[in-house]
Image: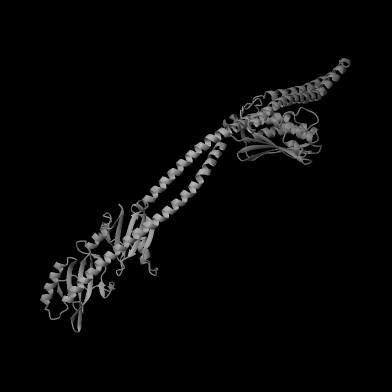
């Protein structure tokens, strides 16, 4: 799908789907918020009813004890009768496993238990609720939950005592176990000390026997936090045993125990999640349909534009014979016809430009050849004329021979440059030390540079610089650069030839303090037939660039008019060594 086709498809989709997305998003938010509020309200109601049921269960036990205490409050009843009565009451009320009558000092007077009573008056850490002392939750020898409840008892007119009952809390387990929320929601009961008293999930009941402390539970900690504001309910979302969990907690009035109702969010918000999924699927399907419709109509509309784009790209690549076929009669059809006319015109202009370029290039080559060859040919011709007159003069014959050899060498150099531009001579690579090559070259060029009244010095990098190269090719490049520097430097000037090591490369610099190169000429100085000299074809630097690139190197130039020029050659270093070095 092209960008324009995607654009049309998205435009169609946006026009139809954006309002639906906005409505759907608002609906989802309202649905989730409303569902959350409803679920929390329902779970809070369950927790409240459970707390009331537990409070009623506790009040019922207290009423039983008060009734028993009222019957035993008569001081004229003997101890044996009270002892039998307590045993009868335990048999009558299974909620209590033991009933014991204590005097005002806490000593047992009578008990339903055979042997020494186990129930004692609750300690200082007990709760006092409406004159009733309630001990902390604990487990008996059978690992069943139990607690001690003590109610005051008047034994005589001037004496008081206590009726102490050990209440079995198994009924609390059943009460909590009957509280269910869906398939995976359960309730739990936590004592005022943070101990787990009962849990509706059978997987959690072993924690009661272990005496697990739930003081760090997020809801229990919030309701038990010292100085925390009084809250009727504590609501939170946290990680539970079955994943993300929604919890609601409330206190049991009077006892300060906490009822916690928990339900996995996946179940609590199942309806909202299902509706959310259905709405998302409907939106996705609508979006897909609109994208397809937009793509089909957009593709038909933009076909002429795509054809023009492809044609423009091919024309930009140089295929001026490209034509586009646009059959529509609208503005796009007119644009296609204008494009084809433009391509025809460009093709004609390109042929004209090529012809003119060939003429210009041939003219530059012809002028350069005439200019460069006329001087040596004229010298040879003049020497030949004199040779006919001075043939008998042996001294002149020697001068004639040197003149012809020199001028023929110049002609061969010009012809070699032309041949190397058309078909570069391959170079042979072998390990060589750049420092050695530059040292030898500097010594060989001293006499040539000295004739021009210029000094030549060279500096070497510390240690050898090994590259894969061709001595003759590098010498030719550097020799050409030195000769160019001589021609651009006035007598008394200086040329510096040096080597460097930088960023894993061997660097050769040829710098002079001559006239420099104008900034506008630097960009084309390495092109064929471009020269800053009054004579020559402008092939020296072009050939130098080709040789350097054959050796995987680069050549660059920096120059400032009136201050000098620096040519920089860079070649990658190699781990290989010349054979004469490795043989040592």
Please state the horizontal and vertical placement of residue 79, each as a whole percent of the image: 12, 77
When the figure is inspected, residue 81 is found, relative to residue 571, above or below; the finding is below
Please state the horizontal and vertical placement of residue 118, each as a whole percent of the image: 18, 70
Quarter-of-image position of residue 325 = top right
When the figure is inspected, residue 464 is found, relative to residue 103, above or below; the finding is above
Check the image and name the residue furthest to the front: 329
Display coloring:
one colour
Q: Residue at x 54, y 35 (%)?
A: 297
Q: Is residue 246 left or right of residue 205?
A: right
The C terminus lies in which quarter of the figure?
A: top right
What number of labels is visible?
Answer: 0
When the figure is inspected, residue 159 is found, relative to residue 95, above or below; the finding is below
When the figure is inspected, residue 570 is found, relative to residue 166, above or below; the finding is above
Quarter-of-image position of residue 239 = bottom left
Q: Can residue 553 be seen in this snapshot?
A: yes
Q: Residue at x 79, y 36 (%)?
A: 489
Q: Residue at x 29, y 65 (%)?
A: 52
Q: Is residue 289 left or right of residue 497?
A: left
Please state the horizontal and vertical placement of residue 73, each as a whole percent of the image: 17, 78
**Front-most of 200 and 290?**
290
Q: Can residue 551 be seen in this snapshot?
A: no
**Front-most of 111 and 247?**
247
Check the image and name the residue furthest to the right: 389
Q: Is residue 335 left or right of residue 356?
A: left
**Front-most of 515 and 392?**
515
Quarter-of-image position of residue 222 = bottom left
Please state the horizontal and vertical placement of residue 240, each as a whole percent of the image: 35, 55
């Amino acid at each position: 799908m092209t960008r324009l086709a995607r654009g049309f498809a998205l435009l169609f989709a946006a026009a139809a789907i954006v309002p639906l997305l906005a409505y759907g998003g608002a609906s989802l938010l309202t649905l989730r918020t409303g569902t959350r509020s409803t679920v929390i309200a329902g779970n809070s109601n369950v927790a409240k009813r459970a707390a009331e049921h537990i409070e009623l269960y506790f009040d019922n036990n207290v009423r039983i004890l008060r009734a028993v205490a009222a019957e035993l409050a008569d001081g004229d009843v003997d101890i044996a009768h009270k002892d039998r009565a307590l045993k009868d009451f335990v048999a009558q009320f299974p909620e209590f496993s033991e009933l014991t009558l204590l005097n005002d000092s806490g000593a047992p007077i009578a008990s339903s238990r055979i042997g020494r009573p186990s129930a004692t008056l609750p300690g200082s850490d007990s709760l006092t609720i409406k004159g009733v002392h309630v001990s902390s939750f604990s487990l008996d020898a059978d690992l069943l939950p139990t607690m001690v409840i003590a109610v005051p008892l008047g034994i005589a007119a001037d004496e008081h005592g206590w009726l102490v009952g050990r209440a079995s809390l198994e009924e609390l387990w059943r009460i909590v176990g009957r509280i269910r929320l869906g398939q995976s929601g359960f309730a739990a009961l936590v004592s005022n000390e943070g101990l787990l008293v009962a849990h509706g999930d059978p997987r959690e009941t072993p924690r009661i026997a272990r005496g697990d402390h739930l003081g760090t539970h997020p809801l229990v900690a919030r309701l038990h936090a010292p100085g925390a504001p009084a809250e009727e309910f504590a609501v939170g979302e946290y990680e539970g045993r079955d994943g993300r969990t929604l919890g609601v907690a409330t206190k049991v009035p009077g006892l300060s125990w906490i009822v916690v109702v928990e339900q996995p969010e996946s179940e609590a918000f199942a309806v909202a999640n299902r509706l959310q999924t259905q709405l998302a699927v409907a939106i996705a399907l609508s979006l897909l349909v609109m994208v397809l419709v937009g793509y089909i109509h957009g593709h038909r509309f933009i076909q002429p534009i795509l054809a023009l784009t492809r044609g423009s790209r091919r024309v930009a690549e140089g295929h001026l014979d490209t034509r586009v076929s646009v059959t529509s009669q609208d503005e796009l059809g007119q644009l296609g016809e204008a494009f084809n006319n433009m391509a025809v015109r460009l093709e004609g202009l390109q042929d004209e430009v090529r012809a003119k370029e060939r003429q210009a290039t041939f003219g530059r080559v012809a002028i350069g050849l005439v200019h460069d060859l006329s001087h040596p040919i004229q010298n040879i011709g003049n020497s030949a004329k004199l040779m006919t007159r001075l043939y008998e003069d042996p001294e002149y014959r020697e001068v004639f021979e040197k003149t012809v050899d020199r001028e023929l060498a110049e002609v061969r150099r010009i012809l070699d440059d032309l041949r190397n531009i058309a078909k570069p001579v391959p170079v042979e690579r072998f390990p060589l030390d750049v420092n050695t090559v530059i040292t030898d070259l500097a010594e060989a060029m001293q006499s040539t540079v000295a004739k021009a009244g210029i000094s030549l010095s060279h500096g070497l990098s510390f240690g050898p610089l090994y590259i894969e190269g061709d001595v003759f090719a590098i010498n030719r490049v550097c020799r050409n650069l030195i000769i160019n520097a001589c021609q651009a430097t006035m007598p008394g000037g200086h040329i510096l030839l040096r080597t460097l090591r930088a960023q894993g490369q061997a660097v050769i610099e040829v710098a002079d303090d001559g006239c420099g190169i104008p900034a506008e000429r630097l960009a084309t100085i390495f092109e064929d037939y471009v020269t800053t000299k009054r004579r020559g074809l402008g092939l020296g630097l072009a050939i130098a660039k080709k040789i350097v690139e054959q050796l995987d190197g680069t050549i660059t130039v920096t120059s400032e008019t009136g201050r000098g020029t620096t040519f920089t050659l860079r070649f990658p270093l190699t781990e290989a060594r010349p054979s004469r070095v490795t043989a040592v």
